[in-house]
Image (cartoon, rainbow, N blue to C red):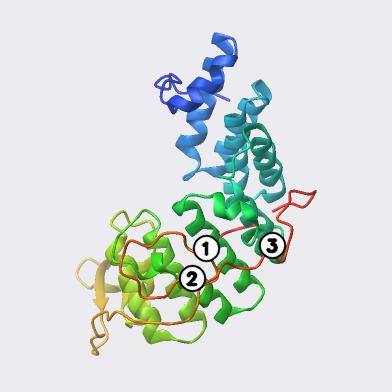
Amino acid sequence: MPIPEDVTGDEIDKDVRQELQSLPKGLAEDVAKNLVMVARLIDEDPEEAYGYSKVALRLASRVAAVREAAGFAAYASQKYSEALAEFRAARRMTGGVDLWPVMADCERGLGRPEKALDMAGAPEVQKLDKAGQVEMRLVAAGARRDMGQIEASIVTLQSPELASNSVQPWTPRLRYAYADALLAAGRDGEAREWFAKAIESDKDGSTDASDRLAELDGVEFVDAFVEDDDEDETTAMPVTEVSATDAPAPVESESDTPTEFADDEDDDEDEFPEDESTPDDGDGDEDGSKGAPQG
């Protein structure tokens, strides 16, 4: 696949570059360039990113970073079985647990939410950093919804991280998932509050919380077409229609419902009390099963 002239391969992370040092120089450069293209395209064109990942994989399948990149490209393209296989290969090479949440999400994508929940209760979860544990909570909540357990999904998301006023990289998605679960349960008022909170923390617009909140508030955006009789042509004029009833301002809600995961640290003021860890009702192993999407 063609590589743009502006791509040198030096753009990759230094840790990945160090992994590639085990390859001959020319080969390492080719692999690096393909990995740069994967990172550049994975959000806007997952299928093309997947193509570049396959090239890198063909050149250097024994490099963990290449297997991981191939996994994420397959995951973004909804090729969950292939993604899970690549993540497992990368994990065997590194011995790390960072990929555990996305592996569990692959299980969801393959229609095995029960397996995802087994992984959510596995010892590997306790080895994850805070961001990884939050990601695992999101996957577990999504698995609950896959199984039609909406209230259980809500309980799973209730946590010190959700209640904290501190904004972290995971905050917008966690608040959004909670709002979406509340809405699915018919708790529209609470859902509105949490969509508003998601907007407050989502400075980069990584979620569509603003659109969801507008829907709840009855805001509609329509194009009104006004015919110009003199020129016999139609001109589009954007018009915004807003409901007459103003929605109330967000109010902090409190809940004493226990969470699904135990949290080993809590430096912020919490809205929900810490809970006990989810019992390991599965072996959390990496047998031949394969993986699913985050909800």
Looking at the image, residue 277 sits to the left or right of residue 210; the answer is right
Which disc number belongs to residue 138? 1
Quadrant housing the C terminus: bottom right
| Residue at mark 1 to residue at mark 3: CA–CA distance | 14 Å
| Residue at mark 3 to residue at mark 2: CA–CA distance | 17 Å
| Callout 1 touching callout 2 (CB < 8 Å) | yes
Earlier along the polypeptide chain: callout 1 or callout 2? 1
Which disc number belongs to residue 157? 2
Residue type, numbered disc 3: Asp
Mark 1 neighbour density, 10 Å: few (under 14) some (14–19) many (20 or more): many
| Callout 1 touching callout 3 (CB < 8 Å) | no
Mark 2 neighbour density, 10 Å: few (under 14) some (14–19) many (20 or more): many
Looking at the image, residue 157 sits to the left or right of residue 27; the answer is left
Relative image position of residue 214 (x, y in whole percent): 33, 75
> Does residue 190 sit above or below 147 in this rendering?
below
Earlier along the polypeptide chain: callout 1 or callout 3? 3
Which disc number belongs to residue 118? 3
Residue type, numbered disc 1: Leu
Looking at the image, residue 76 sits to the left or right of residue 244; the answer is right
Quadrant housing the N terminus: top right
Secondary element at image label 1 = helix
Secondary element at image label 2 = helix
For the point 28% across and 57% down, the residue is 203
Residue type, numbered disc 2: Leu
Nearer to us in this view, 57 or 178 = 178
State which quadrant residue 86 falls in. top right
State which quadrant residue 143 falls in. bottom right
Mark 3 neighbour density, 10 Å: few (under 14) some (14–19) many (20 or more): some
For the point 34% across and 56% down, the residue is 168
Nearer to us in this view, 178 or 156 = 156
For the point 25% across and 73% down, the residue is 239
